[in-house]
Amino acid sequence: MLIFRLIGLLLGLGICASLCAYIFTHQRKYLTLAGRLFRFAVYAALIFFALLIGERLFVPVI
C-alpha cells in the first residue's frame, strides 16, 4: 500500500510540474504529458481503491 501512495505522490508532482512547464513555455507537449499522467493517476487510484475494498471484504472471512 505504501508503494501505491508513493506512486500517487509522484504522479501528483509530475502533473504539477508538467502544468507549470506548460504555463511558462506554452509548449503543447507538456500539456499532453500532464494529460497522460492524469489518466495513469486515475487508473492507479482505481486499483488502489479496489485493493482497499477487497481488503475490507476478504480479511474478515480469513
Image (spheres, rainbow, N blue to C red):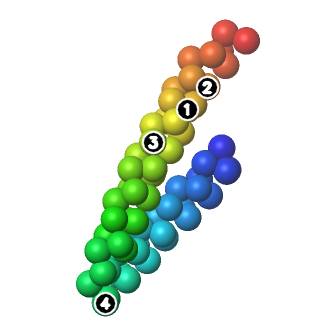
- Write down the residue under mark 4: 24
Residue 22, given in percent of the width and then of the height, sits at: 32, 80
- For the residues labelled 4 and 2, the Cα–Cα distance comes to 43 Å
- 21 relative position to 44: left or right: left
Residue 51, given in percent of the width and then of the height, sits at: 57, 31
Residue in the image at 55% along x and 32% along y: 52
- Write down the residue under mark 3: 43
- Write down the residue under mark 2: 55
Residue in the image at 62% along x and 58% along y: 6
- For the residues labelled 3 and 1, the Cα–Cα distance comes to 14 Å
Looking at the rendered structure, the secondary structure element under dot 4 is: helix
Looking at the rendered structure, the secondary structure element under dot 3 is: helix
Q: Which three-letter amino acid code belongs to the residue tagged 1?
A: Leu
Given the current orientation, which residue lies at the most extreme top position?
A: 61
CB-based contact (under 8 Å), mark 2 and mark 1: yes
* 54 is higher (above) or lower (below) than 27: above
- Write down the residue under mark 1: 52
User: Closer to the camera, 21 or 44?
Assistant: 21
- For the residues labelled 3 and 4, the Cα–Cα distance comes to 28 Å
CB-based contact (under 8 Å), mark 2 and mark 3: no
